[in-house]
Amino acid sequence: MTVRVGFLGAGNIATYHSKSLRASGADMTWSAVFDTDPDRADRFAAATGARVSSSAADVIAHSDAIYVCTWTSEHEHLVELAAGAGKAVFCEKPLGVDYDSAQRVVAAVESGGVVNQVGLVLRRSPVFHLLKHVSLHPDAGQLQTVIFRDDQFLPIQGRYASTWRADVDKAGAGVLIEHSIHDIDLLEWMYGPITSVSATARYVHEIEGIEDSVIVSAVFESGLHATLTSIWHDMIDRVSNRHVEVFGTKLWARLTGEWFGEVAWNNGDETTTVSGADLLELATEVSPGAGENPDGAFIEAVSNNRPASPPLRTALRAHLVVDACYRSIAGGGSLITIET
Ligand SMILES: NC(=O)c1ccc[n+]([C@@H]2O[C@H](COP(=O)([O-])OP(=O)(O)OC[C@H]3O[C@@H](n4cnc5c(N)ncnc54)[C@H](O)[C@@H]3O)[C@@H](O)[C@H]2O)c1
């Protein structure tokens, strides 16, 4: 079945998905696009061939699958509209501005019984697949600690230039929910459930409710502990970047980048370093699914009416952990226990 794809929101991430859909070669057509900013809808339509629509309801009526790519506060009611009409949903992360909203978003797709996928695209990133393989390998010995650092420029400037990320009602909060929800998800995807967190935040840019540097200390069910440091700064030339170091009793490993980057590790005598095409080849060899196009996978799932991955429910768990971090921040870094 050729899937008719509609877009709600035609900004930065919608453009990314449109390019990724084209690159995937998926069996799809562009149905319609709606953005409250008509210029953005026009530009998206010119680039894709989608029809510009005057309402979300019209896009939904003429599509089999809906991409919800608006700012975060709009996700809830748009997902409810799309899922209520029985349409497949790809919803960007975060699902909602807080855990309660995220729960309602998940309830909407599950009660609608629709194919659904969340934009936790780094779950297909080759660097993270390889790091996971290396750090869970028996040669690593017992894992001891993980140091995760994530930094990018404050995205109300530069390539993003989005004003909504400085509006707590639209974004929910700052760098932790908006950006590092990916990192929390990746940490649990690699190392299992987090059972407690303690976190502190700073508001260096003095934007109300928008924290721009966060440190989370997390303990996992396995006993492993980790720190996550997440920063929004003003260095426009520094693109979003992730650095992870893992120490085990017999392992040192380091990841830099987000998709290809570089992974280096030593679990014996020598340090191995891989990047680029070699990294992709190795990652796909040791971990099927590494490097897979998330948009192509979504369209295939819709076409075959089978579950897509990761479903929205996956992000709910990351929201729960993020919510615990914010409760810890509010309590001055208090220890918060999380149910697994
Ligand atoms: N998965 C990722 O790595 C990733 C990366 C960037 C952004 N995101 C998420 O994607 C979402 C959008 O981010 P962005 O960077 O594309 O922002 P953006 O500002 O570039 O685009 C958002 C668009 O939504 C439109 N919009 C707002 N309300 C709307 C409504 N009710 N109906 C239709 N259009 C509406 C705005 O006019 C704007 O054009 C956010 O939730 C963000 O957190 C995810």
Image (cartoon, grey):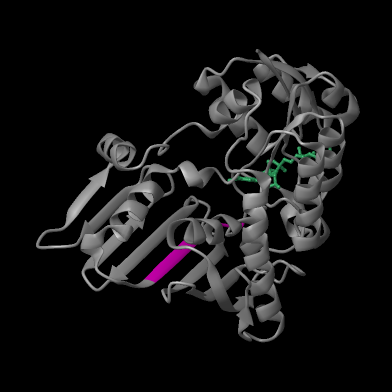
Question: How far across and how far down the image is residue 35, in percent?
Answer: 81, 32
Residues rendered magenta in the picture:
146-154
- Can you tell me which quadrant of the image ligand 1 is in? top right
Figure check: 119 above or below 253: above
Figure check: 122 above or below 190: above
- Going 51% across and 22% down the picture, which residue do you hit? 24
Whether residue 224 sits left or right of residue 62 in the image: it is left
Can you see residue 151? no
Q: Confirm whether the magenta stretch covers residue 43.
A: no
Residue located farthest toward the left when viewing the structure as drawn: 269
Q: Quadrant of the N terminus?
A: top right
**In which quadrant of the rendered view does residue 297 lie?**
top right
Question: How far across and how far down the image is residue 94, in percent?
Answer: 68, 52
Figure check: 160 above or below 86: below
Q: Nearer the viewer, residue 267 or 232?
A: 267
Q: Nearer the viewer, residue 126 or 84?
A: 84
Q: Confirm whether the magenta stretch covers residue 151.
A: yes
Figure check: 18 above or below 193: above
Whether residue 123 sits left or right of residue 83 in the image: it is left
**In which quadrant of the rendered view does residue 7 lie?**
top right
Question: How far across and how far down the image is residue 6, in percent?
Answer: 75, 24
- Going 55% across and 26% down the picture, which residue do you hit? 296
- Going 70% across and 17% down the picture, which residue do you hit? 30
- Going 74% across and 34% down the picture, which residue do you hit? 114
Q: Nearer the viewer, residue 316 or 243?
A: 316
**In which quadrant of the rendered view does residue 203 lie?**
bottom right
Chief secondary structure of the magenta span? strand
Question: How far across and how far down the image is residue 242, in percent?
Answer: 44, 56
